[in-house]
Amino acid sequence: MELNDVYDEHRNLTGKVHERGTPWQPGEYGVVVCVWVYDGSGHMLLTRRAPGKSYAGTWENSGGAVQAGETSRQAIARELYEETGILAREEEFELLDTYRERNTFYDHYCLKRRVPLKDIVLRDGETDNVMWAGSGKIHWMIRTGRICGIIGNQFKRLEKQLRLRNMPKFRR
């Protein structure tokens, strides 16, 4: 059983916990974290969701729910490690964006890492493939439904910020 801290609409802890998979009550919110890992040469790291998961077979960035007692940065470091085997210190993650939708606050981070695909450790039941993809390929994958719709929308919203970090020629 996974538990998540419950926040109010201003992102203050309420002292309550929520059991994953059960409905949220009105005025209750959880936190979900996502990270865009980039290599500094225009590529983003994508993983494919394993069979048995929601949106199985679609590509995404790493992320997941913040568990009870965790901070957002602790959660993103844990999620990235669980899904790829990439270790990063909490302070290495740069917060790009935070917003609230329905019963969830979303924190979007980025992390610069050049990791050979052979060094990525995929976790059974979580991820079953990995790739580095440039912006053009990501847009094609969004148009063709290969990237989960939610993740595609997030990418489009954050693309300019990611390009500024990931492509030195855009840093003017």
Image (cartoon, rainbow, N blue to C red):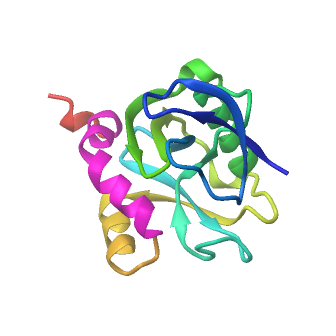
* Residue occupying the point 34% across, 60% down: 153
Quarter of the C terminus within the rendering: top left
Seen from the viewer's position, the closer of residues 87 and 167 is 87
* Magenta segment: 148-166
- Let me know if residue 37 appears in the view: no
Q: Is residue 2 above or below residue 95?
A: below
Which image quadrant is residue 49 in? Answer: bottom right
Percent position of residue 92, x then y = 55, 23
113 magenta-colored: no
- Which residue is the extreme one toward the left? 172
164 magenta-colored: yes
From the viewer's perspective, tell me whether residue 14 is left or right of residue 22: left
From the viewer's perspective, tell me whether residue 138 is left or right of residue 117: left
Seen from the viewer's position, the closer of residues 14 and 156 is 14
Q: Main secondary structure of the magenta part?
A: helix
- Let me know if residue 150 appears in the view: yes
Q: Is residue 122 above or below residue 147?
A: above
